[in-house]
Amino acid sequence: MADGGSSQTAVLRPPRGRPLALDAGTVAVWGTVLGAAAYLLARLAPDVHGKPLFEDEAVAGLVAARPLPEVVETVMWERGGGPLHFLLSHLTLAVEPSAYALRWVSVLFALATIPLLYDLGRRLAGPFAGGAAAVVGATSSLLTVYGSFGRMYALYAFASTLAIDLFVRAVERRTGRAAFAAALAAWLLPAIHPYGAILVASEALVALWLWRGRPLRPALPTLAVGLAMLPFAWADLRLAQRFAVGLDGEERLAGPSDAWGQVGRAIAASAGGSYWLAGFAIAFMLAGAVVLWRSQRAFVALAAVALLAPPVLLMIVRTGSAPGLSPRHLIFALPLAAGLIGAATARLLRDAGTAVRVAAAVLLVAVTVLAPTGGIRDPRDWWNDVLGGGPPDTALGSPGELALPTTWLRGNVGEGDVLFPYSPVFLGAIDAAGQGQTIPYSQASLIERSMERIPSPAPGLVVSVPVGSSQVDLDSLRARLGRDFEPHLLGSWLLIESRGPLADDHTVLRSIYHALRSARLSIRGDRRVELSWYFNVTLAALCTSVRSYGDRCPPPVPTVSG
């Protein structure tokens, strides 16, 4: 077995120490890589300010805006998961306290992924394969959507590509130093996202198969890096507890169609676009696996294990989500798919002349750019589709719709005020809302853990409700709320204020429940039905938390019918 590279690959590379000749083929490859990066930047830059802010981005921003020890405590203990993106966001917000600064961080990591994809493809099957891999990545739905999204997914894609690239390099060189560098890159994965452990475990299995226990001493630094990942296992267990039981209290197993469907969507989002093109992507991936089997067997084995493990695990591990997996969680499929497709493309054109290769590069760019997206949809459009229904500039998280509520928040939110929940409104005013303490909305256990970090008494409370195009009967709402609350209808958002002090945790939770229940009973209009899901989830979780204090929830809110 020759895992270090085939003679075909060696022919495509210049001798060590000799500069690469700038022939037409080389210019075409580098032009393709630079063009891919430029295309991705052109896709992402308008979305930084053009896409509405989303509640998942609010989680990253509002957690990261707090003092650093609290950030670590919230992520590692309260929420669970990887802390690295939150720490980077904390540093970013210290320089520029803006939601859009978080999006630019994602843009930078998405762009940095493109040259790494080139290097991965180059290591596998030469420069042309690298150029093809860069194009696949730059036009993938995963990067064109999450490359401007203010969460960890662009960083996750970058770290996954770096880890796989250095893994292939370590297999080529077979030195302790190369293995240690690959292990350090792998360490980043669980520090960013819990599902990164799947790629780490896949690399470990293949590495153990190659190593077979010999020699031991050069492997010790790599094993030490493995031990350094154990703190993330604790955070991942906290995250797993949050999703152990569904909203209806029942544990579930994902069905085979759901489990495999998520992997199919991840591949479609990585390379195929719409589902009919995803079939061609899978065919090219399989062809790439055949091409690389003799020369890069370790990479092929890694791709197989990493892509097959998620659906298998999903079918045997109980989870309360449905089905507990999303293509964005499997963004490590992107470099695997790009590398395999790049290798297949290079093999197909191995004996072609320069002109044919240049024409093929142009054709590849055209197909991937013009192909319809698929596998995922942009979550930032969801609020507008469900509650707004108007053009993008009227979406709930758009700058126009946030102008009034964020202006109000900047003049009224003070240090220590409780904010509920993680909302685009609070993210839009993060320079002021970052002083507050934010409570999540969807799970009672997470709500109760969040209360542990909130000192009592709380000086004030602001509850955010996304009413969209619905109408709010303010007179009825004021009557239901009572004199301790004041509603503010500011465009598409309803902010319910309660000035404190709120004596204790029980008072805070009961006040939030009262504000939301009153708002639900006072909303009229054609979007009332869509809002019912939001109210059902928030009120159910809050009611469970209120009961934990020995109290009873007010009578249930009548179910909204169409």
Image (cartoon, grey):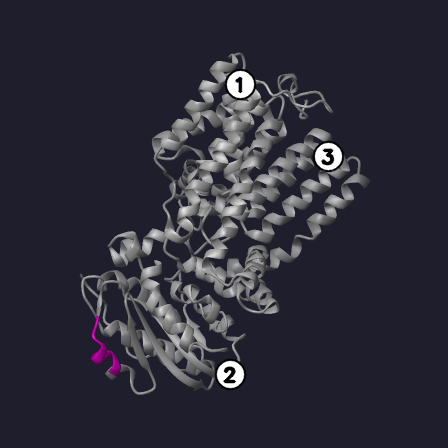
User: In the rendered image, which quarter is residue 174 located in?
Assistant: top right
Residue sitting at 53 percent across and 75 percent down? 452
> Which sits earlier in the primary sequence, circle 3 or circle 1?
3
**Mark number displayed over residue 347:** 1
Whichever of labels 1 and 2 marks the residue nearer the N terminus, that label is 1
**Residue 358 higher or lower than 46, as above or below:** above
Q: Label 1 neighbourhood size at 10 Å, few (<14), some (14-19), many (20+)?
A: many
Q: Where is residue 471 in the image (x, y as percent from the top left)?
A: 21, 68
Give the residues drawn in magenta, as a range: 472-478
Q: As shown in the figure, which amino acid type bears the numbered disc 2?
A: Ser
**Residue 115 appears in the rendering:** yes
Relative to the observer, which residue lies in front, 404 or 324? 404
| Disc 2 packing (10 Å; few <14; some 14–19; many ≥20) | some
Left-right relation of 16 to 120: right
Separation (CA) of disc 1 from disc 2: 66 Å
Q: Identify which residue, 479 or 474, lies in the foreground.
A: 474
Residue on which disc 3 sits: 212
Magenta segment includes 553: no
Secondary structure under the numbered disc 2 in the rendered image: loop
Count of numbered circles on the image:
3
Task: Give residue 436's position: percent from left, percent from top.
Answer: 48, 73
Residues marked 3 and 1 touching at CB (< 8 Å): no
| C-beta proximity under 8 Å, tags 1 and 2 | no
Q: Which residue is drawn at 39% across and 57% down?
A: 53
Q: Mark 2 points at which residue?
A: 456
Magenta stretch encompasses residue 476: yes
Within-10-Å neighbours for mark 3: few <14, some 14–19, many 20+: few
